[in-house]
Image: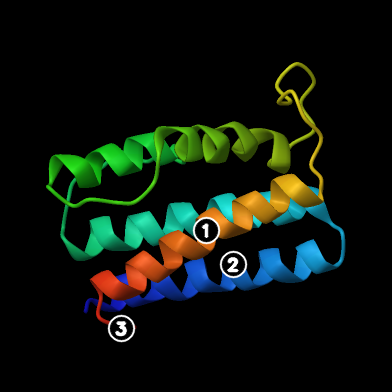
Amino acid sequence: MKDETRAWIIFAQENLASARILYSSHLYNPCLQNIQQSVEKALKSIIIERSLRFSKTHNIIELKQVLSDANISIDLTDDECDFLDVIYLPSKYPLSGVLPDFNPNEEICLNGLKIAEKVIRLTGKIFNLID
């Protein structure tokens, strides 16, 4: 495994660990931000390890497409990708008119955590880090 790949995986895992702590502290907005970042970094770790070309983006759908084009299947539905993409800017910046049609809450964060955990598990399997 490339050193750069390992760094991306570690950061993805740290974002997920941060999201769990934020969730348990009822800090839902930063929880969502860390969920999105965890998935983004996990997908980028695969892209980097496989030396695939991609543009600088935070868009989960675009990252999934790069992997799909390389015949790497990622168990993320379009709805899950849309969810992760829609929370990126609003969880980072207080932009009026950009906020999604929901306020971060326990249920939304729990759903996001499940998605991020699934992607981290899948990444671990791809790199033979877990069974």
Quarter where residue 45 is shown: bottom left
Q: Position of residue 46 (x, y in %)?
A: 27, 61
Label 1 close to label 2 by CB (< 8 Å)? yes
69, above or below 106, in the image: above
Residue kind at label 2, given as amino acid type: Leu
How dense is the environment of label 1, judged by Cα within 10 Å: few (below 14), some, or many (20 and up)?
Answer: many
Can the viewer see residue 57? no
Question: Which residue sits at x=34%, y=67%?
Answer: 123
Q: Position of residue 112 (x, y in %)?
A: 61, 51
Q: Position of residue 28 (x, y in %)?
A: 80, 52
How dense is the environment of label 2, judged by Cα within 10 Å: few (below 14), some, or many (20 and up)?
Answer: many
Q: Label 3 belongs to which residue?
A: 131
- 117 or 5: which is nearer to us? 117
Q: Which mark is residue 116?
A: 1
Mark pair 1, 2: CA separation: 7 Å
Question: Which residue sits at x=71%, y=26%?
Answer: 100
Relative horizontal placement of residue 91, taking residue 45 as reference (left or right): right
Can the viewer see residue 126? yes
Mark pair 3, 1: CA separation: 18 Å
